Amino acid sequence: MARRDFCNRTRREFLWETGAGFGAAALTGMLDSDGFFGSAACAEESLSVETTPLYPKPTTLPPKAKNVIFLFMYGGPSHIDTFDYKPDMVGMDNKTVAVDTFGRGGKKSQGRIVEPRWQFKQHGKCGKWVSQLFPHIGCCVDDIAFLHSMTADSPIHGSAMLMMNSGKLISGSPALGSWITYGLGSPNQNLPGFVVMLDPSGGPISGAKNWSSGYMPAIYQGATFKHEGSPVLNLSRPKGTTRELQRDMLDTLALINQRHMATRSDNSDLAARIASYELAYKMQMSAPEAVDFSQESPSTLKMYGVGRKPTHHFGVQCLLARRLVERGVRFIQLYSGGNHIDYNWDAHGDLVHNHSKHAGETDQPIAALLQDLKQRGMLEETLIVWGGEFGRQPTAEYAKGTGRDHNSYGFTMWLAGGGIKGGISIGSTDELGSRAVERPITVKELHATILHQMGIDPNQLSYFYNGLDQKLVGVEPVSPIHEVIA
Amino acid sequence: MTKDFHQLYLLRIGAACLAIALTCQFDAIANPITDAFQEVQSLLAARCFSCHGPDKAESGLALHKQALAHAESESGLHAIVPGKPKASELLRRVNSDDEHERMPLEGEPLKPQEIELLRQWILDGAKYEKHWAFVPPKRHSTPVVEQSGWVRNPIDTFILRRLERHGLRPSPPAEGRVLARRLYYDLTGLPPTISELNNFLSDERPDAYERLVDKLLNSPRYGEKWARHWLDVVRYAESNSFERDSTKPFAWKYRDYVIRSLNEDKPYDQFIREQLAGDELDEVTKDTITATGYYRLGTWDDEPADTLQARYDDLDNIVSTTGQAFLGLTVGCARCHDHKIDPIPQADYYKLLAFFADVTPYAMPRNNDVKLNSLWDCSPPEAAQKRERLAQRENQLDEQARKFEDQAIRKMSATDQNRSETDAREELLQEKIHKYLSPKEFQEYSEIKAQLSSIQLQQNELAPADWVLSLAKCEPNPRSTHVMYRGNPHVPGKEVEPGFPELFGGATANIPPQSGDARSTGRRRVLANWIASPNNMLTARVIANRVWQHHFGRGIVRSASNFGRLGSPPTHPELLDWLAFYLIDHQWRLKPLHRLILLSNAYQMASSADPSGLAIDPANDLFWRFNMRRLTAEEIRDSVLYVSGELNEEHYGPSIYPELSQEVLATQSRPGHDWHTSNRRDASRRSIYIHIKRSLIVPEMLLFDFPETDTSCEARFNTTQAAQALNLLHGDFMQTQAKYLAERVVREVGDDTLAQLRHTLRLVLLREPDSQTLSECLDLIGTLQVEHGLNEHDALVQCCLMVYSTNEFVFLD
């Protein structure tokens, strides 16, 4: 073949010279502010406000939090075995009581009590009773606001998951993380604004529907993120493609694209698409950098339980969550549990086995996350949400055994950081924990609280679709849970 | 259930809506209709209706109806005195400096331009004009234009007339290559081959272009391209969503029905009748039965917490989709309350819903048996009847067996009870059921099981059923339909009969009485006939607009499924009416309409910018040039396959499953579940044949703005994201296709690098490569080999991958 000498013109220089011509300078400073790339690299940036839906937007209320970490205990942890202390139930095991329940087994009016299977102990200055399932989280109760009177609209996983994630029982609406990135944009364009991390056993039921952007553009959907392998989908270069090789390839691509654009300069989509390749190139640096723990001290790794069973996986994810928050990712959702039944908190069979496993995997990492954020001064601006799609019944599901069916009439979730009062508990369930009695809280109120802390008026954030101003919290005004706001 | 959920659809106008209303303001260019009232109404709705509107009339003033707004209020003053802004109390109050007097009392004061809008409107008589779309279309004569030389057909007169008025010239004609590429993609979703392109360019006959239009309209690829537009509108997918997201069996037959209907140029009115009432027509065929698959496409919760609510959610999905798809109306907004902006009272919603009262649920809750309601056996009647009898017997026996099983399972350990809910159920029962039944019971149970086996054998001997996903079972005597209080199905109000929305003049629906053995109510047929009537003021306009939309990149009405007041007004209303009548006059066939549009000079304009055009009409509301567009997800994937030589052009049939990476499958609760990866040949079929699993959309589709599958999509987004670039650079699909392209190139032109590059560029970009591009690619090949140590072939593969990423490949001029 007619082999030619390598062309020694530096393509990159050429690219930067031409590339700087069509961009919006406004963004350069913003991109620079993430601290990961020097201004020289940003000079080629050609994203503009119009072509970057994730461009940071001003908040409508003074924000208390800048980021959210949602620790999703998929399957539905039992509140009376974790944080909702029911001392009166001790000794009532196997007694039949009249109690209205509604789970996957339908509606029942009586059942056999399964008394809480763990001892409770008081913790912190606030003296909060926490079960032995969570000795580590027990140490953090002074930073936590417990919501003991959560209610959900469905006791069935599929619809309840959608409710907790998107505020609707039916699929097709954007997830909470989509609403937040839609409302606020994202300060770091080199990483997704909405990140989801899954359990090794698989996703939750309904899979990607839980982080879908619904009727909003796909840019607002959650991106699954991993510590092992390629952090985001298609991020890893295929075997044999080095970073330098790709740089040369992208430089040639840019030359061809620039020439194509020269006679079509009024079409900003072309510039945006050129820029998207540069962004893709940068993400290959920024995402692996985010998942690289080599700069973390051994004590930090130990604190999160990294490298040890059974905490390794969730520990890695919690540590990763902190690192993503440091890098400006708006909304991070971690799933404890995946797949079906005992791969998650869905304790239909053996409650002790199930909850010991999942609490054992998550207790230490979650406590580490809270403490680590706090010691770094980040907890104030990071809102932590803990909970599942519902709780569990006080009574047994079957004639034998300790399995509990689903319970959406009353359950516990908790919030910490991000302008939330610590060491308090609000609402309560009845003496069996079968339903919320004092100050029932809806999922919409929880969503409203999260939006409010992020500086978004939950009743104003809307997206016009299907002839309506759609809102995460629905059309009736919803107030945040004021009692927990510091 | 909490109260909020039932109020989901209550229309509230918040500040954000105002923002939308205001950004929807169109200047004179965009809005030839003097519909100042549309803006006024949006403003009144956003800022005034909460106290002076349909729900409340404080101080005796309501502003949502002309008579009320013009009337004397309790204070004895007139809020509005038509023609006299100075005498109008409303204007004084919005202008007041006294914050106790100034209206609106809450929120920011009105902006000066908003006050001016109101002043002008009052000066002009404060008329509550009828919305353009709710006035029946007129047969307009084609306008007179100055540069009649430019006019190729009547469409051009409507376009040119407005351009001339604004001092604009139409862009010059697109060059042949650009036009051919545009036309191929528009009609077939694929590019031309080099030889097809050259044939066209060298065809000097005066009607060469016209011949090409006809050739492509007659290509089976036309249906494969245009069916997808319809599938977006009817939110087509092949699974149910929710926890199990189970597959909808034979949904693909509906997809094939749409493709076939388009290829056969089935009249659109017939297309409507078949989908809405294919089981109630005079002549019911397999085709019309398949069309009723329309009712089975939506999401379906197999385990609803509230069965009644779920049932009404499903019906709502049908009413909403039908309203948007066929009528361009967002009737779904009236589920809980009267529509605040469009004249759609809540009762109208339920009158429409009553037409669908005989539509059975997809399947019974907590039962995945789709056969009963949704699968129709279209095999010869005798075999079908025999199969039906066997199925009934099987159901009875199943039920009997189930009783024994449940009885035994209740006595098992919790672990085993749990196991009985998994795939291991049969295994468990075989192993242990005898322990939990008395000998007599067990014997009985065993006999039932033996009979079941024998039935299964008999079933296997029959020729396979020809199942069609459809409205296989209807409820001929449905319960009455009621207006549900605030949309809550647990609080039924006034009873309603099937009826047409008031805004159409309030004609009553005459449902012919049905015979005693009727399988359905006959209501849907009445609805279908009413929608598919040339006298329906919206139907023809809505579909004509969709056809225009997919040729020009946007509709004459941009909000293609919302012709109401909250939608965008038409930029060329008379043209829209004219096209609607053209369609009706041509037996509702789409192909003549396509042809007319494609043969217009308006369609054949270049997309290049012109300074005066950009200055006067930057949004191209007047169509002074053609709109560039990015290829759709399907077009990108199909073109990549086509150019690499891999595309398998088999038409129709069951869906295919492209290979998904482990990381994509890991998002499922059971990774890999229900994803039956196809072999290489099948996986290379066109994208319209990809299985659409609601919770697992193929990344090559999802990333490039494939529509949300659960609700009707009128127009896709057009996003640009880094994830798209990553997919094209790193995704397995692209990596593989780049290899195939390189192999094809070597096969076709041999070993010479320059020839290889030239051929690659020609294949992908469909033009002779310019010397600069060629030399840059040559440089790249050199760098890849010298600096990065790639061999010749791998360097070519990388180059192929790069060329697939060019904007020139992905955008149409």
Image (cartoon, coloured by chain):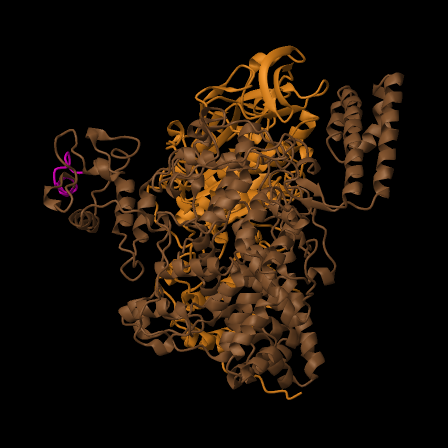
Chain colours: A orange, B brown
Query: Which residue is nearer to you in this view: B274 or B660?
Result: B274
Residue extending furthest toward the bottom = A2
State yes or no: residue B304 in magenta: no
Residue A6 figure quarter: bottom right
Secondary structure character of the magenta stretch overall:
loop
The number of discs equals 0
From the top left corner, tell me how far across and down residue B426 is, in percent.
81, 32
Q: Say above or below: B310 vs B772.
A: above
Work out which quarter of the rendered image holds the N terminus of chain A and state it. Answer: bottom right
Query: Which residue is nearer to you in this view: A396 or B559?
Result: B559
Range drawn in magenta: B91-104
Whether residue B677 sits left or right of residue B155 in the image: it is right
State yes or no: residue B100 in magenta: yes
From the top left corner, tell me how far across and down residue A421 is, in percent.
40, 30
Residue A210 appearing in the image: yes
Instruction: Give the residue drawn at x 67%, y 25%.
Output: A351
Instruction: Give the residue drawn at x 56%, y 21%.
Output: A121
